[in-house]
Image (cartoon, grey):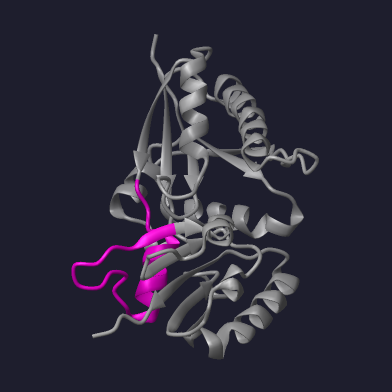
């Protein structure tokens, strides 16, 4: 019996021109695109995915299958437990979609914002579906351009300094652990403007939201000078769009 194939395709951060040639080739192998519906506020994320497919997937008929994304239970206090429960619900949904909507021998795909390797749950969930062995399929991963790469490109900066390291973390961990001894820190998934808790002396920030899209916002400067402006822009943008994705680099000034 022919086995199902599932592609995990990184599609960049909103600009269709960010798709790699490999990603475009992969789109043209797909019969079914699986999409998680995150509600009206984030409908634009589904729209962009459909526009990308309309632009590049030309070689065969395809269809979209959408499923409602489960909401993380706010009553579960522990963050890890809350995420684990959410993942378990997604595992069941992915498994059901692949079994019911993807015929043996056909190719399905999940279109991942940015790159599948960086702060995205798709690969972890697919690994769990595979481990359950209820629906046989093979899967491949197609890398994409991440918001971190776009941030650096838009600000025309290198992320690392000569011989230096770059620490990539989340707003939650920045709040818990601070900057430590890291000189260059990329922060993702920060819904609370945690940079305001960082001692601003000798720290620069390079911030971007909706990177790669028509709504892109950029701010750079000394943290003490621009922190309030970023908070204001972020609040206004979230109110206007109903959602926001932003990333930033904190860079300490190192004595020469």
From which residue to which does the magenta span run?
143-168
Is 207 on the left-hand or right-hand side of 29? Answer: right
| Residue lying furthest left | 163
Q: Residue at x 72, y 41 (%)?
A: 72
Depth check, front residue: 100 or 12: 12
- Quarter of the image for residue 160 reads bottom left
Depth check, front residue: 158 or 53: 158
- Quarter of the image for residue 230 reads bottom right
Q: Residue at x 29, y 53 (%)?
A: 21
| Residue lying furthest top | 1
Q: Residue 59: percent from the left, percent from the top? A: 39, 43
Q: Is residue 44 above or below residue 99?
A: below
Q: Residue 11: percent from the left, percent from the top? A: 43, 53
- Quarter of the image for residue 74 reads top right
Q: Residue 140: percent from the left, percent from the top? A: 35, 33
Q: Is residue 141 above or below residue 154?
A: above
Q: Residue at x 41, y 36 (%)?
A: 7
């Amino acid at each position: 019996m022919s086995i199902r194939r599932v592609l995990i395709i990184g599609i960049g951060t909103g600009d269709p021109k960010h798709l790699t040639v490999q990603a475009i080739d992969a789109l043209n192998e797909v019969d079914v695109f699986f999409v998680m519906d995150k509600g009206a506020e984030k409908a634009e994320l589904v729209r962009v995915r459909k526009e990308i497919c309309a632009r590049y997937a030309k070689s065969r008929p395809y269809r979209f299958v959408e499923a409602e994304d489960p909401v993380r239970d706010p009553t579960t206090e522990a963050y890890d437990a809350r995420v684990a429960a959410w993942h378990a619900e997604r595992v069941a949904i992915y498994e059901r979609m692949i079994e019911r909507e993807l015929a043996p021998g056909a190719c399905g795909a999940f279109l991942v914002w940015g790159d599948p390797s960086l702060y995205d749950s798709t690969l972890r969930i697919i690994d769990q579906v595979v481990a359950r062995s209820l629906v046989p399929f093979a899967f491949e991963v197609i890398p994409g351009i991440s918001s971190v790469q776009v941030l650096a490109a838009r600000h025309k900066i290198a992320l690392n300094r000569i011989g230096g390291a770059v620490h990539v973390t989340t707003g939650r961990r920045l709040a818990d652990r601070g900057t430590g001894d890291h000189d260059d820190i990329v922060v993702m998934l920060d819904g609370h403007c945690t940079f305001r808790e960082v001692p601003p002396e000798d720290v620069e920030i390079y911030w971007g939201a909706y990177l790669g899209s028509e709504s892109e916002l950029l701010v750079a400067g000394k943290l003490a000078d621009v922190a309030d402006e970023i908070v204001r822009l972020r609040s206004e943008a979230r109110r206007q769009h109903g959602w926001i994705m932003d990333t930033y680099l904190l860079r300490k000034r190192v004595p020469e």
